[in-house]
Amino acid sequence: MAIPLQHQAQVHDRRFQKIRLTFGQVAPGLFLQYLKQIQKHLRFLRLVEFFVRDRIGNGADVDHSLGSQQYGYGVDVAFHDFMLMMKNVHPACRVALMWFSSYDRDKNIPQPGDEKKKMKEFSRLIRLMKRLRSPVNGCPWDRSQTPETLSRHIIEEANELAAAIQSGSVPGQIDELGDLLLQVVFLSRIHQERGNFSIRDVMQRLREKLIRRHPHIFGSQQAKTAEDVKMLWEQVKQKEKGRDSVISNYPQTMPALAVAARIGEQAASVGFDWRRLPSAAGQPFPDRPPAELALEKVPEEAAELKTALEANDPQQIREELGDLLFALVNVARLMNINPETALWESNNKFTRRFRCMESRLRAAEKTFEQVNADELEKLWRECKGEELKS
């Protein structure tokens, strides 16, 4: 009796898992021998072997001073590249690539064999939240929460996580990721109690969305660069949501700088970008960096703001100031700089220098009101120079 295809896949998956756990110590020939046992129906196995050996050389030619883990990584990348190249040629390659891509290349990262064990912690977290929400012996504060009362906590936790990332603190990121995860589990529990959905529905919807929005991995679409992937993502997202416009409807509570950056990205995903737009004369721009071209828009917007100021028109001033800010965000986007991060860094820099001025004035037993503009400018330059030296 033939083994059902689903059971075969499970057996193959376990066998691949065992190979991956020791992949850093095996040679290409042994790995390919395993492949012959698992995928013996693939007639192009010799081509796989040729491709892998061509990419990293025979076992005897490899510099083993790099260590077995780096050597295994080389085999890993070579085989992965081959499967990417062949997935549209042979249908079995697509299945093999999905198997292969699910394993970590770094042996220091927990491997798939530990996933079930590690997920026990998540299950414990779900049960803990159920206990805290219990109407019999739960926590009064947790029981009183609603999606509306938790909404502000979500924004706070997201901001604190962003701050931890910017600081580079790994322990801080662990804590803040946990706090943000708590909000997801908390909200899911409330909705489960109301009969709306559970955390399982949330994870299932996310998994399905990731598969749909990666047609270059799980479908027949092609995407060679990160920019190609962004374009595909926006196209699929627009189709999913049934929007007439590629630009999303953003909530007014979202930071305006972040919205401006996303709007620029979405417009660029369909070709409306400084990389492709013609000049005012109708001719293609010369081969210059897109950010440099976008930067030329800034003085133009500044001149229009100056005209509005001279006209003393509040509505026009606000409009032109917004256009100037939008132009600057566009420059930041094309430089791969987060405008929120850049502005926060400037905020912190200004705060440090201003506090330095306050400290010096206190030492001189003076206040800001007791010094003139020239003295303040001198103080500012001194504090700036002192910071630059350090």
Image (spheres, rainbow, N blue to C red):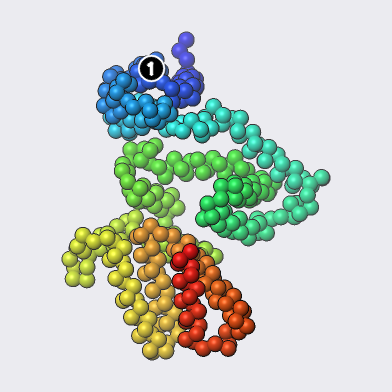
The image position of residue 25, as x and y in percent, is 43, 22
Can you name the residue that lies furthest to the top here?
A: 1
Asked if residue 184 shows in the view, the reply is no
Instruction: Write down the quadrant of residue 75 in the picture.
Output: top left
Asked whether, in this view, residue 22 is left or right of residue 36, the answer is right
Asked whether, in this view, residue 151 is left or right of residue 133, the answer is left
Q: Nearer the viewer, residue 185 or 349?
A: 349
- Against 328, residue 175 (above or below) is above
Residue depicted at 41% across the width and 21% down the height: 26
Q: Number of callouts in the render?
A: 1
Q: Nearer the viewer, residue 387 or 192?
A: 387
Q: Amino acid at mark 1?
A: Leu
Asked if residue 227 shows in the view, the reply is yes
The image position of residue 196, as x and y in percent, is 63, 47
Q: Which residue is mark 1?
A: 30
Residue depicted at 79% across the width and 46% down the height: 138
Q: Nearer the viewer, residue 247 or 170?
A: 170
Asked whether, in this view, residue 204 is left or right of residue 30, the answer is right
Q: Nearer the viewer, residue 92 or 242?
A: 92
The image position of residue 238, as x and y in percent, is 40, 53
The image position of residue 359, as x and y in percent, is 59, 75
Residue depicted at 38% across the width and 30% down the height: 66
Residue density around tag 1, few if under 14, some if 14–19, many if 20 or more, within 10 Å: few
- Against 69, residue 367 (above or below) is below
Helix, strand or loop for disc 1: helix
Residue depicted at 25% across the width and 63% down the height: 277
